[in-house]
Amino acid sequence: MPIVELYHFWSSVCSVRCRMALEEKGVAWTSRYIDLFAFDQLRPEYLAINPKGVVPTLVHNGQPIRESLVINEYIDAAFEGPRLTPSGPLEAARMREFVYACDEGFSAIVKLTMVRYILPKLRNRWGDAELRNQAARRPTRF
């Protein structure tokens, strides 16, 4: 039986996208929760599978797959279950256009979520000095 693990943060839009794909396909998977508020994404063991230090990451039989759109395409191709991508080329193109439009819109949502939701919680929990220290740990080369 294949081992499928999803490293994710509960309220990450990209993580939600991958959890939905796994559920739609009926794939049994193990949750590996990455607490962004505890900076789990910067731990060496996580950076070993995702050098960017972002979520989500899917690990299938020991092999990491990164970036939510790529992960979802992989899930669709690698596992039995209902197809997530339409079989017709035009329909598949329309789906990809929709996904692209959503992804473009997500960048605004992600920035807003960071500024209005995540950053205030991090400031309350850690303070500005510790946030600067943690930011210095963030990988800049992949």
Image (cartoon, grey):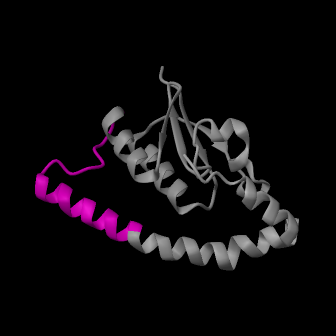
**What residue is drawn where x is 67% and y is 79%?**
116
Q: Is residue 91 above or below residue 51?
A: below
Q: Is residue 90 magenta?
A: yes
Residue 84 in the image, given as x and y percentages of width and height:
30, 48
Residue 7 falls in which quadrant of the image? top right
**What residue is drawn where x is 54% and y is 43%?**
57
Using the image as rendered, state which of residue 137 and residue 58 is in the foreground: 137
**What residue is drawn where x is 70% and y is 70%?**
118
Residue 80 seen by the camera: no
| Residue at the extreme front of the image, as rendered | 141
Residue 79 in the image, given as x and y percentages of width and height:
36, 33
Residue 51 in the image, given as x and y percentages of width and height:
58, 43
| Residue at the extreme top of the image, as rendered | 1
Residue 138 seen by the camera: yes
Query: In the picture provided, is 103 more to the left or to the right than 50?
Result: left
Q: Is residue 17 magenta?
A: no
Residue 47 in the image, given as x and y percentages of width and height:
64, 41
Query: In the picture provided, is 44 more to the left or to the right than 5?
Result: right
Q: Is residue 131 above or below residue 31?
A: below
Using the image as rendered, state which of residue 106 and residue 95 is in the foreground: 106
Q: Is residue 38 above or below residue 71?
A: below
Residue 122 falls in which quadrant of the image? bottom right
| Magenta residues (range) | 79-103
Q: How many marks?
A: 0
Query: In the picture provided, is 13 more to the left or to the right than 77?
Result: right
Classified by dominant secondary structure, the portion drawn in magenta counts as helix
**What residue is drawn where x is 80% and y is 65%?**
131
Using the image as rendered, state which of residue 48 and residue 114 is in the foreground: 48
